[in-house]
Amino acid sequence: MLDDFMVRATLAGIGVAFAAAPLGCFVVWRRMAYFGDATAHAAILGVALSLAFSMSIFVGAVIVALLMALTVSFLSGRGYAMDTLLGVLAHSALAFGLVAVSFLSGIRIDLMAYLFGDILAVSRGDLAVIWGGALLVILLIFWRWSALLTATLNEDLAYANGIDPKREQLALTVALAVTVAVAIKVVGVLLIAAMLIIPAAAARPLSRTPEGMALIAGLIGTLSAVIGLRAAYVFDTPAGPSIVCVAAMIFLVSSVLRGFQTAR
Amino acid sequence: MNLVEVKDLSVSYGAQKVLSGVSLNVTAGEIVTIVGPNGSGKTSLLRAIIGAVKPVKGRVGRAQGVKLGYVPQRLHIDETLPMTVSRFLKLPGGVGQAQIDRALKQAGVPDLSNAQLSKLSGGQFQRVLLARALIGKPDLLLLDEATQGLDQRGSAAFYQQIEQVRQETGCAVLMISHELHVVMSASDRVICLNGHVCCEGTPAVVASAPEYRALFGTGTGGALALYRHEHDHGHDHSDHAHDHDHKEAAQ
């Protein structure tokens, strides 16, 4: 079954959708969309470094994404507005990454594969890394779920319950870095934030509880991956962007549904 | 028995000192109110007690196994976060539906269990926050301007609810409030704070203390300090004409 590249691609897409769904909910609730973008853009620098030092791309991307996320956490609240800070860091990381890749003259690299993903080329080994990383993220978030939710609602409320919001923030940061690293192959660094935010945002009008929203986001992400891949095959379009397009259309439908609900 | 004992507490945010040398304690079952002008460190004091800020000096001691219930000043629930009242009360975990129903009843909102948090009115929301603070059967309830944004009737009703909760559960209450007239009548003890403890004691003692009057008497034309009687004031307002004071108070 895994011999078929479409099967491998679909499984890879579903793996990323599962990890991105609960994490994406927190990104939406905590207004971290730009934060996710910055972390994802930094990963291209990680790719360049991995290729330069012949490391696994996954490891390089995790390390650089984590460093980026920690830098943002550290610098926030130190004199710059958060969106300015993230705008500076996200785009400089991307620019430095692209420049760094150009130095690697000895190796022929398909840059597009890292920017927009190369899901149809997912190997069995890639699949193992993607599902391993996705399971790690899901377990981490499942384990910290209540504490994360409490800290997301209000930091002082968390302290009063004996929860350290900074520790929960760190857990999210690690989860984000791992998700970015496993998603590079699937949707590429430029569209990772879309996989985090769009399914979660589309799930919002359909949910009454945080848990419900995470589950529905997972379903929407999975649906987007399956339909998007199929569409890419039929219409011969790029796979990663096709997945994001499907997610965006589901978001549109769910927003319209909400419009009807409130109008009633 | 002292539930919480604050000794010589100093708190700073960066170079800015907000509290210095604050000592206070709360004993079982009493209602203590902290009053003070904006920026006097009231919220910082509560945050230090729940452990959200680290003191630069001094310490916050809690009695063995004492349970705190905290009602924050305001809580913004992001529209993107779907949350029913009962799910909110279950955070961070280990609470059953029976306890939720009991806490909501104690807080005076028994029927809100399935409502969405983002759809509640200001008064309902404060009561849900109160219910969440009550759910762990706290020995000490900490309220940070819990009636902010409520109208006078709403806040009076809220304080009555607090008094009733105290009678039912016997928990102590440490609260911050701006509404001096309501608070003064409902408190066992008042602490007047302005970076340090200016004065403290029963409402009557604090109301007649010159430090309290210096903070709340001038500038407001005496209107705020005069919660009790128009004639028990005036002599220490040397910079005000007396009849001016009376006019303001009579309004």
Image (cartoon, rainbow, N blue to C red):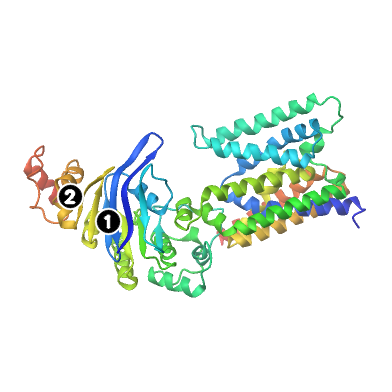
Name the residue: 45% across, 61% down.
Answer: B120
Count how many numbered circles sit on residues in the image.
2
Name the residue: 43% across, 73% down.
Answer: B102
Residue B100 against residue B71 in the figure, above or below:
below
Q: Position of residue B4 (x, y in %)?
A: 34, 58
In the image, taking residue B94 as reference, residue B213 lies left or right, namely left
Q: Position of residue B210 (x, y in %)?
A: 14, 46
Q: CA distance from mark 2 to mark 1?
A: 15 Å
Q: Position of residue A105 (x, y in %)?
A: 84, 24
Q: Chain of mark 1?
A: B
User: Residue A52 lies in what quarter of the image?
Assistant: top right
Q: Is residue A76 visible?
A: yes
Name the residue: 63% across, 62% down.
Answer: A212
Q: Earlier in the sequence, mark 2 or mark 1?
A: 1
- Label 2 is placed on what type of residue? Ala
In the image, taking residue B206 as reference, residue B241 lies left or right, namely left
Q: Which mark is residue B197?
A: none
Count neighbours of disc 2 (C-alpha within 10 A) and say few if under 14, some if 14 to 19, many if 20 or more: many
Front label number (2 vs 1)? 1
Name the residue: 52% across, 65% down.
Answer: B90
Q: Which mark is residue B33?
A: 1
Quadrant of the frame with the C terminus of chain A:
bottom right
User: Residue B14 lies in what quarter of the image?
Assistant: top left
User: Residue B195 lies in what quarter of the image?
Assistant: top left
Count neighbours of disc 1 (C-alpha within 10 A) and say few if under 14, some if 14 to 19, many if 20 or more: many
Quadrant of the frame with the N terminus of chain A:
bottom right
Disc 2: which residue: B225
Q: Chain of mark 2?
A: B
The residue sitting at the right extreme is A3
